[in-house]
């Protein structure tokens, strides 16, 4: 789109199920605050471990949205 400006924000989504769900959760939360989301890039994936089990999947997601003046 010509003469457009985009801003980037980062969110960390979490899930007890998978990294995919964690990324989707980050996008869902971003939608509540920002409109006109454009591109999401997974920056980092990690998990927390409790005892012998994975307790939480985490996805750090960089999200761009169109900046309206």
Image (cartoon, rainbow, N blue to C red):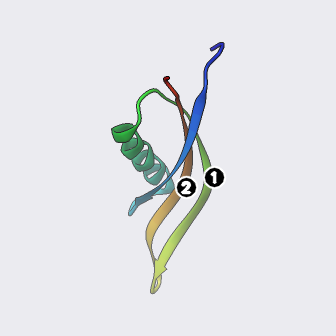
Q: Residue at x 45, y 54 (%)?
A: 22
Residue in front for this viewpoint, 23 or 18: 23
Label 1 crowding class (10 Å Cα cut-off): few <14, some 14-19, many 20+?
Answer: few
Picture layout, residue 41 above or below residue 1: below
Q: Are marks 2 and 1 in contact (CB under 8 Å)?
A: yes
- The residue pinned by badge 2 equals 60
Q: Which residue is mark 1?
A: 43
**Residue 24 x %, y %:** 43, 45
Q: Position of residue 32 (x, y in %)?
A: 33, 40
Q: Quadrant of the N terminus?
A: top right
What residue is rendered at 49% in x and 74% in y? 48
Of residues 49 and 36, the one drawn nearer to the viewer in this rendering: 36
The residue furthest left is 32
Point out residue 16 in the picture as x, y percentages from the top left corner. Answer: 38, 63
Residue found at the very far right of the displayed protein: 2
Q: Secondary structure at mark 1?
A: strand
Q: Residue at x 59, y 30 (%)?
A: 6
68 is higher (above) or lower (below) than 52: above
Instruction: State the separation of the CA atoms marked 2 and 1.
Output: 5 Å
For residue 26, above or below residue 2: below
Q: Position of residue 50 (x, y in %)?
A: 44, 82
């Amino acid at each position: 789109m010509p003469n457009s400006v985009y801003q980037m924000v980062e969110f960390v989504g979490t899930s007890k199920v998978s990294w995919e769900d964690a990324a989707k959760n980050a996008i869902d939360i971003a939608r509540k605050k920002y409109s006109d989301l454009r591109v999401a890039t997974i920056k980092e994936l990690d998990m927390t471990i409790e005892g012998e089990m994975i307790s939480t999947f985490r996805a750090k997601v960089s999200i761009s949205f169109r900046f309206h003046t």
